[in-house]
Image: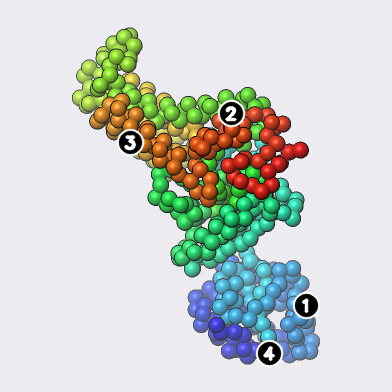
Amino acid sequence: MKQISGALQRDVAALKKLLPAEDILTFPFAAEGGTAFTVVFSDAVTNKELLGEEVVRPLRLLSGKPSLRAVKERVNFSEVRSEKSLKKLAEEILAGNPVLLWEGAEEGVIVGTKLVFVRAVAEPPTDVTIKGPREGFIEDVKINTSLIRRRFKTGELLLEPVTVGRRSKTIVMVCYLAGTSVEETVKEVKGKLEKIDIDYIPDSSYLTHFLSSRPYSLVKQVGTTEKPDIFCAKLAEGRVGLLVDGSPIALTVPYLLVEDFQSSEDYFVPSYRASFTRLLRLFALLVAIYLPAFYVAAQLFKLQLFPVKLLLTIAGSIRDIPFSPSLEMLLVLLVLEILNEASIRMPKYVGMALSVVGALVLGETAVSAGFVSTPAIIIVAFSGIGLYAVPNLIEQTSILRLSMLLVAGSVGTYGIVLLTGFTLFYLVTAENFGAPLMAPFSPLVKRDLRDSLIKYNLGSLPLRPKTLKSPNKRRLK
């Protein structure tokens, strides 16, 4: 690996050879003592005003032959370090940190005057709460770590950076509480991160593939959140967290399926209300998955499942429909998915109009024209609303709902039962980082049931979840 030679022109030429892009600039200047200096920096991501005021101006007043220590003391900036390797110096320049060279330099001096454009810390759009903190992560990993530090004023909070991506050099911050998180889990997470060999990491979702024991599983195996309070609560239980530079979504492992039925607001309201809300989310999700399938199965194979009055109403509605019940329900579900996708991708001022057109005009016209029946529209509407009661599972449950519909139209209620059994078997056998996905229900951990779908009050939760195997078991005395 090539290193600084001390010959200014040769070192500058070597850096320019490594970084031939036009936006990599050099700024030569001389000190009062006659020593020639050169600053190499990236035009787009360096704070040039700060560089001139805090670096160049103090060094112009330097007299005599400068040493590495004298240059560091003269630079009026806190983030100053040195490096001999030309390759590492080039990486720092690309990151926005200018490199200072001079004639006879022992090492290149890196100054942390990176120019960072960030948005304000605000409430995340995917997790809105009425009670509780409203801060959300943003795309800058330093600000995200500061949000964590504000909540954990202890030296036990460890933040260890790992660089991932051959070309992006993305910083991934591994966060955990020493003595609370399992050391084997921390080592496994860092080991998996260090093995990743990919060009570019644009978002934290890229890492979930490499962290999962079943990368192609329908069910996710890594927890996600955009809220610092939820992230810190998971760290306090013994999990390991990941903050990715450039992504507002943090990752946590191990992940339990029950986490997505919980909300941060559950811990700021009475326990009976939190328990009711969690059970309501589960009920809504089951309705979203099974209601279209049972409606189709009942029409095709088990008409006696309908009450007589309801059966007469449905029979009158579907009398002139040209499609079979399963094809009709499939078409309506596909239209719902298309409308949902279009409303998300369209600009906001167009998305509202699109929703009105899809829900009122298209739906009413389709029923009036006899293409679909009114019960099908109502059932798909109920299913769509229920699906969004647990937003973190939308991708998985929408596919499961479609699968249930297909087997219901082919085999009937027996197909629904068989697919349900297969899904449950798949869930109870899944685990990641030593934690079963379906815990604390399978395997049954009675102590952890107090904060699962039913939430006890805070005084009844003195111990950390047994499933996470934290060495520091007690959290409340």
Find numbered disc 4 in the image and state the secondary structure of the residue it sits on. Answer: loop
Q: Amino acid at mark 2?
A: Ile
Q: Amino acid at mark 3?
A: Ser
Separation (CA) of disc 2 from disc 4: 69 Å
Find numbered disc 2 in the image and state the secondary structure of the residue it sits on. Answer: loop
Residue where numbered disc 1 is placed: 74
Q: Quadrant of the N terminus?
A: bottom right
Residue at position x 70%, y 86% from top?
30
Nearer the camera: disc 3 or disc 2:
2
Tell me the number on the disc at residue 454. Answer: 2
Front-most of residues 375 and 185:
185
Separation (CA) of disc 3 from disc 2: 29 Å
Q: Amino acid at mark 4?
A: Gly
Image: 46 above or below 217: below
Nearer the camera: disc 4 or disc 3:
3
- Give the mark, 2 or 1, whose residue is nearer the N terminus: 1
Label tally: 4
**Dot 3: within a 10 Å radius of its alpha carbon, few (fewer than 14), some, or many (20 or more) residues?**
some
Q: Position of residue 231 (x, y in %)?
A: 62, 46
Q: Position of residue 63 (x, y in %)?
A: 79, 87
Q: Quadrant of the C terminus?
A: top right
Residue at position x 34%, y 24% from top?
294
Q: Are marks 1 and 4 in contact (CB under 8 Å)?
A: no
Residue where numbered disc 4 is placed: 104
**Dot 1: within a 10 Å radius of its alpha carbon, few (fewer than 14), some, or many (20 or more) residues?**
some
Residue at position x 33%, y 20% from top?
375
Front-most of residues 9 and 398:
398
Is residue 146 among what the camera can see?
no
- Give the mark, 4 or 3, whose residue is nearer the N terminus: 4
- Give the mark, 1 or 3, whose residue is nearer the N terminus: 1
Q: Amino acid at mark 1?
A: Arg
